[in-house]
């Protein structure tokens, strides 16, 4: 089968990269919105074609910068975003209608999306022009990364709210980036990354259909996010091919998708941070190059190349420039882009692709036998599988069966990026000033409305799903904004954003209404 033909094993587009290369989207975020805005402009000026936002831990966990639990963490592992004010600064001087933005945020993803939409509206950019992705993949948080806030059903309700809202109002926006990257980084094998990620994706499909959304309206805006690991270079290429094939088959044969775009698996790839070494960091450039090649040979639509110093700290400008230029050299100085799926037909790659598909189906059966993704997660199935694989991998490295070049000659002379400790104090000061100058009567009213809508919708039970009996949705994109579910939180979140309600204030309402989740597998 040629590229561009069902089941799209060889890629979604017949020409591959001949007409358009992948988006070069470097993950970036640190300190306050001011510093990250400068880095964004630097990346765009040096060949970046998309933005990808890393948020700090308080933002990821739905806390404001002045919360007691945020102390010492503001701006450390990403940018601090407490309100619309910060998002406005983050995109100052950047046309949000012409740049594609990815936001790595999960539990409070709907809040950050609301901040983004409100910022664009203040720039005069229509919702219909916004391009990008929110990660919004809470299932992988329970399974691997563990930065969840609310219980599964409440979190899934918020995710479907974003799916429904964007389908009708933000048609170019990818509503979920279903992520295998974090599953792999936690220690999963390639087949586990593939199987668990696709199982999560199919769960989101079922949830969307249960909301009466039309599959062919929302499925084209589901995207994926995979790891690229040079330890298993050939298997990685086969993994991407198998992923496209499995997804296309499931969407067509099980869920009755009619449009080809619904069957396409479009994915972003990031090179494997877990393989980077803190010693002899220059060796990481070669590791990242090999990983990037695997992603390109697998026909990724978007790529982030890790910087050589990321095992030590957030990347310096020099390191991130080398990482970005690694992609540019592959795209501009080789003929790789002229050959769609160049490994197609290779006996090794085709065999690995078939094997990965078969093993993935075996995992699907195990998950189904446990009652589905959420029951399997709550039973600790994914946790046990991943931790066992991680342990075996580390034993292999420690025993020397898996070689890691350069560990025997320790060197750590690389300069690293340091976060100015004054940034946290400045962020807190600006936040306190914002609370004084905004219209707090409006804030109170917004939060009351949010609480009422959240409370009314939180006990809505899934009606169950029969793949053979799907029906056309009553929700259609041509009626944008008119047919949202009664309890969809997105409109009130956007109003909250415009009135400068903070992420901490919004998430506190949800903590009180939904509760906080505790994973008995790790606590």
Image (spheres, rainbow, N blue to C red):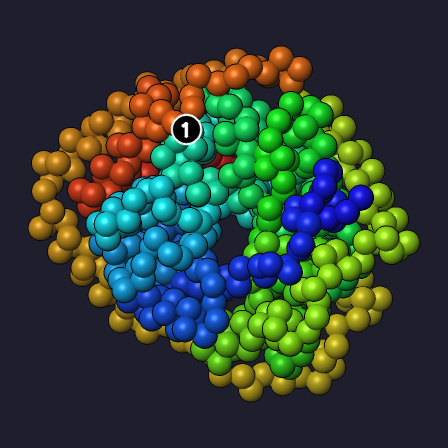
The answer, for residue 83, to whether it is visible in the render is no
How many numbered circles does the render carry?
1
Decide: is 284 above or below 109.
Answer: below
Pick the front one: 71 or 79: 79
Callout 1 crowding tier (Cα within 10 Å): few <14, some 14–19, many ≥20: some
Task: Provide residue 124's location: percent of width, then percent of height.
Answer: 23, 50
Which quarter shows the C terminus?
A: top right
Element type at marker 1?
helix
* Residue 314, above or below 171: below
Going 26% across and 71% down the picture, which residue do you hit?
422
Indicate the position of residue 125 as horizontal and vertical percent values: 28, 49
Image quadrant holding the N terminus, namely top right
Q: Position of residue 14 (x, y in %)?
A: 68, 50
Figure check: 215 above or below 291? above
The residue at the point 68 percent across, 73 percent down is 334
Q: Is residue 232 left or right of residue 178?
A: right
Q: Residue at x 82, y 69 (%)?
A: 400
One can see residue 9 in this view: yes
Q: Position of residue 78 (x, y in %)?
A: 41, 61
In terms of depth relative to the viewer, which is nearer, 218 or 144? 218
The residue shown at (80%, 33%) is 362
- Disc 1 target residue: 477
439 relative position to 67: left or right: left
Q: Nearer the viewer, residue 296 or 508?
A: 296
Q: Quadrant of residue 57?
A: bottom left
């Amino acid at each position: 089968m040629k590229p561009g033909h069902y089941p799209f094993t060889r890629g979604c587009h017949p020409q591959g990269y001949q007409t358009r290369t992948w988006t070069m989207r470097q993950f970036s975020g640190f300190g306050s919105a001011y510093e990250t805005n400068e880095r964004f402009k630097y990346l765009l000026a040096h060949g970046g074609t998309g933005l990808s936002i890393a948020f700090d831990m308080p933002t990821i966990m739905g806390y404001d910068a002045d919360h007691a639990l945020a102390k010492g963490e503001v701006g450390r592992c990403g940018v601090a975003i407490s309100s619309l004010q910060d998002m406005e600064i983050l995109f100052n001087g950047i046309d949000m209608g012409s740049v594609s933005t990815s936001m790595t945020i999960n539990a409070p993803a709907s809040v950050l999306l609301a901040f983004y939409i409100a910022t664009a509206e203040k720039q005069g950019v229509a919702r219909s022009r916004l391009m990008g992705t929110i990660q919004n993949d809470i299932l992988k948080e329970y399974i691997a990364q563990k930065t969840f806030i609310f219980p599964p059903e409440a979190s899934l309700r918020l995710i479907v709210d974003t799916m429904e809202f964007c389908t009708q109002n933000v048609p170019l926006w990818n509503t979920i980036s279903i992520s295998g990257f974090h599953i792999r980084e936690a220690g999963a094998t390639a087949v586990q990354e593939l199987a668990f990620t696709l199982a999560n994706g199919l769960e989101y499909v079922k949830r969307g259909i249960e909301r009466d959304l039309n599959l062919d309206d929302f499925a084209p805006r589901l995207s994926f996010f995979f790891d690229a690991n040079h330890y298993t270079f050939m298997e990685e290429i086969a993994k991407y091919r198998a992923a496209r094939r499995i997804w296309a088959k499931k969407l067509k044969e099980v869920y009755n998708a009619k449009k080809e775009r619904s069957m396409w698996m479009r994915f972003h790839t990031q090179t494997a941070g877990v393989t980077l070494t803190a010693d002899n960091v220059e060796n990481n450039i070669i590791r990242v190059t090999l990983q990037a090649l695997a992603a390109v040979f697998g026909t990724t639509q978007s790529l982030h190349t890790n910087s050589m110093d990321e095992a030590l700290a957030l990347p310096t400008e020099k390191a991130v420039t080398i990482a970005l230029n690694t992609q540019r050299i592959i795209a501009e100085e080789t003929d790789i882009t002229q050959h769609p799926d160049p490994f197609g037909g290779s006996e090794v790659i085709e065999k690995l692709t078939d094997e990965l598909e078969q093993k993935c189906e075996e995992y699907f059966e195990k998950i189904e036998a446990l009652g589905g993704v959420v029951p399997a997660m709550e039973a600790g199935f994914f946790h046990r599988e991943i931790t066992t694989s991680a342990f075996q991998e580390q034993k292999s490295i420690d025993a020397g069966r898996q070689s890691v070049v350069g560990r025997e000659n320790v060197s750590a002379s690389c300069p690293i990026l340091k976060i100015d400790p004054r940034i946290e104090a400045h962020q807190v000061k600006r936040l306190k000033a914002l609370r004084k100058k905004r219209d707090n009567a409006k804030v109170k009213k917004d939060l009351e409305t949010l609480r009422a809508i959240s409370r009314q919708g939180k006990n809505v039970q899934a009606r169950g799903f029969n793949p053979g009996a799907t029906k056309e949705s009553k929700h259609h994109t041509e009626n944008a904004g008119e047919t949202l579910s009664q309890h969809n939180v997105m409109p009130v979140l956007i109003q909250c954003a415009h009135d400068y309600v903070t992420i901490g204030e919004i998430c506190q309402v949800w903590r009180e209404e939904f509760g906080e989740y505790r994973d008995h597998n790790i606590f």
